[in-house]
Amino acid sequence: ILFRFLSTFETINRQCGNADVPVIKLLSFLALLLFCLILIV
């Protein structure tokens, strides 16, 4: 689960890397973190 979470975050980070919008990066990271926590629980 953790590996899948990291790989998904990497792909989203790459996609957001094209656009200089750190807010989107933060939101996507928080969303993935929340999703990962839900999977763990």
Image (cartoon, rainbow, N blue to C red):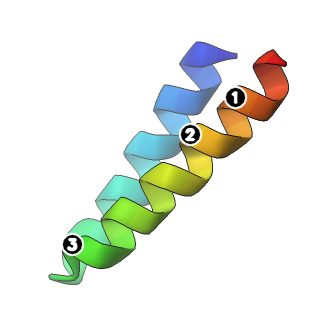
Query: What residue would you read off at disc 2?
Result: 33
Q: Residue 15, labelled with which disc?
A: none
Camera-side residue: 3 or 24? 24
Query: What residue would you read off at disc 3?
Result: 22
Camera-side residue: 27 or 3? 27
Quadrant hosting residue 1 = top right
Q: Earlier in the sequence, mark 2 or mark 3?
A: 3
Residue at x 56% of width, y 16% of height: 3
Alpha-carbon span between mark 1 and mark 2: 6 Å
Quadrant hosting residue 35 = top right
Residue at x 39% of width, y 42% of height: 10
Residue that protrudes farthest toward the left in the picture: 20
Q: Is residue 3 left or right of residue 10?
A: right
> For the residue marked with disc 2, what is the amino acid?
Leu
> For the residue marked with disc 1, what is the amino acid?
Leu
> For the residue marked with disc 3, what is the amino acid?
Pro
**17 is higher (above) or lower (below) than 36:** below
Q: Is residue 7 left or right of residue 22?
A: right
Pinpoint residue 17: horizontal percent, then vertical percent. Answer: 22, 67
Alpha-carbon span between mark 3 and mark 1: 22 Å
Crowding around mark 2 (Cα neighbors within 10 Å: few <14, some 14 to 19, many 20+) is some
Residue 19 seen from this side: yes
**15 is higher (above) or lower (below) than 13:** below
Query: What residue would you read off at disc 1?
Result: 37
Q: Is residue 36 left or right of residue 31?
A: right
Crowding around mark 3 (Cα neighbors within 10 Å: few <14, some 14 to 19, many 20+) is few
Residue 15 seen from this side: no
Residue at x 48% of width, y 28% of height: 6
**2 is higher (above) or lower (below) than 8:** above
